[in-house]
Image (tube, helix red, strand yellow):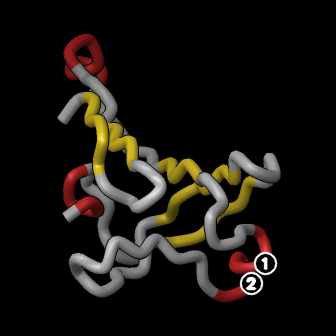
Amino acid sequence: MKRELVDLVPNELVHVVNINTGGRFETYVIEGERGSGHICVNGGAARLAQPGDRIIVLAYGMVDEADVPGWTPRVAVLDENNEVVQTIGI
């Protein structure tokens, strides 16, 4: 549900910022087990984040110029258990 909350789709390119290390990398969305609460970094990118690290996942989209004045990004803030504690623009 969290993925849909912010409109991420499988295979979508995302940027990840690791708050703990300051590292940044690109990867893509892989759908996990629904309801597990897991946000995992797989493959080579797994060397760039450790369990317990706080991360920001950024996705980008195109907005028609006419829609810009009323456009708001979708943001979900999660706690240490990956439960939604705040939403913005949703």
- Which residue is label 2 attached to? 44
Q: Residue at point 44% right, 45% down?
A: 60
Q: Nearer the viewer, residue 86 or 8?
A: 86
Instruction: Say which mark, if any, is on residue 63.
Output: none
Left or right of residue 16, residue 38 in this image: left
For this view, does 58 lie left or right of residue 55? left
Residue type marked 2: Gly
Camera-side residue of 59 and 3: 3
Q: Which residue occupies 21% across, 60% down? A: 4
In terms of secondary structure, where does tag 2 sit? Answer: helix
Compared with 72, 69 (above or below) is above
Looking at the rendered structure, the kind of residue marked 1 is Arg
Residue 79 spot, x, y in % from top left: 42, 49
Q: Quadrant of residue 43?
A: bottom right
Is 90 above or below relative to 68?
below
Where is residue 34 drawn, in percent x and y? 23, 80
Q: Position of residue 65 (x, y in %)?
A: 30, 21
Eye-nearest disc, 1 or 2 = 1
| Relative vertical location of residue 64 with respect to residue 6 in this rendering, above or below | above
69 to the left or right of 40? left
Q: Which mark is residue 47?
A: 1
Name the residue at 18% across, 36% down: 90
Question: Marks 1 and 2: CB-CB under 8 Å?
Answer: yes
The 10 Å Cα crowd at callout 1, few under 14, some 14 to 19, many 20 or more, is few
Secondary structure of the residue carrying tag 1 is helix
Spot occupied by residue 39 in the image (x, y as percentages of width and height) = 46, 71
Furthest residue in direction top, as rendered: 69
